[in-house]
Image (spheres, rainbow, N blue to C red):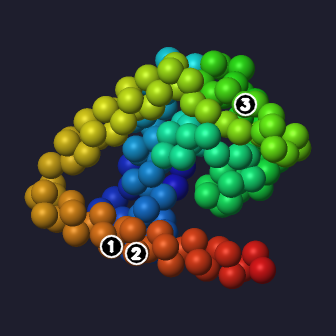
């Protein structure tokens, strides 16, 4: 399919689960990216920032493990977030090779704004009832866990 072409309902019905999830993710990210860009960060950086909010004050190695990415990718993303004033990194006094990452007030405000956009996205999906949305989330959580397990097995 070429860019800009509409996909038919029949084509959607034939897509594998991973492709369906990817299509939803791309549409969701397109919805968010315009606003995320106004905050001075990228979608990828938001992913890290959101992970940091959940565990503020962790070290880079733990963040890499938590988001299933290598440390060099984390280092680059954190540098950009630090330059944007979203996070602060400081040397761990107990181990000078480790850096502790904290989210700044600017970073927290950005995450709050993006989470509100996420809620708007969820509200705009009207084809599912609240109970169907809950059931879908549970199914997707299960698929996420299984997918990450497969990814780790492949990397061994």
* Picture quadrant of residue 137: bottom left
Q: Which comes before the other along the chain, label 2 or label 3?
A: 3
Q: Neighbour class for label 1 at 10 Å: few (<14), some, many (≥20)?
A: few
Q: Which residue is mark 1?
A: 139
Q: Is residue 41 visible?
A: no
Query: What distance separates the C-alpha of mark 1 from that of mark 3?
Result: 36 Å
Q: Which residue is mark 3?
A: 89
* Picture quadrant of residue 103: top right
Query: What distance separates the C-alpha of mark 2 from that of mark 3?
Result: 34 Å
Mark 1 touching mark 3, by CB under 8 A? no
Residue nearest the viewer, comparing 23 with 89: 89
Q: Position of residue 88 (x, y in %)?
A: 67, 27
Q: Taking 19 as reference, is 67 left or right?
A: right
Q: Quadrant of the C terminus?
A: bottom right
Residue 142's disc is 2
Mark 3 residue element: strand
Quick check: 26 above or below 8?
Answer: above
Q: Taking 9 as reference, is 69 left or right?
A: right
Q: Position of residue 116 (x, y in %)?
A: 31, 32
């Amino acid at each position: 399919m070429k860019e800009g072409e509409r996909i038919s309902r029949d084509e959607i019905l034939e897509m594998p689960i991973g492709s369906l999830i990817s299509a939803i993710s791309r549409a969701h990210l397109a919805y968010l990216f315009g606003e995320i860009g106004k905050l001075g960060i990228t979608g990828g950086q938001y992913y890290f920032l959101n992970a940091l909010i959940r565990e503020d004050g962790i070290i880079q190695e733990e963040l890499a493990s938590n988001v299933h990415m290598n440390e060099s990718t984390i280092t680059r993303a954190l540098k950009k977030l630090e330059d944007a004033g979203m996070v602060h990194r400081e040397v761990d006094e107990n181990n000078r090779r480790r850096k502790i990452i904290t989210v700044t007030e600017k970073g927290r405000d950005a995450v709050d704004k993006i989470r509100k956009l996420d809620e708007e996205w969820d509200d705009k999906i009207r084809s599912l009832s609240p109970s169907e949305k809950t059931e879908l989330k549970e199914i997707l959580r299960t698929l996420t866990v299984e997918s990450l397990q497969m990814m780790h097995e492949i990397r061994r």
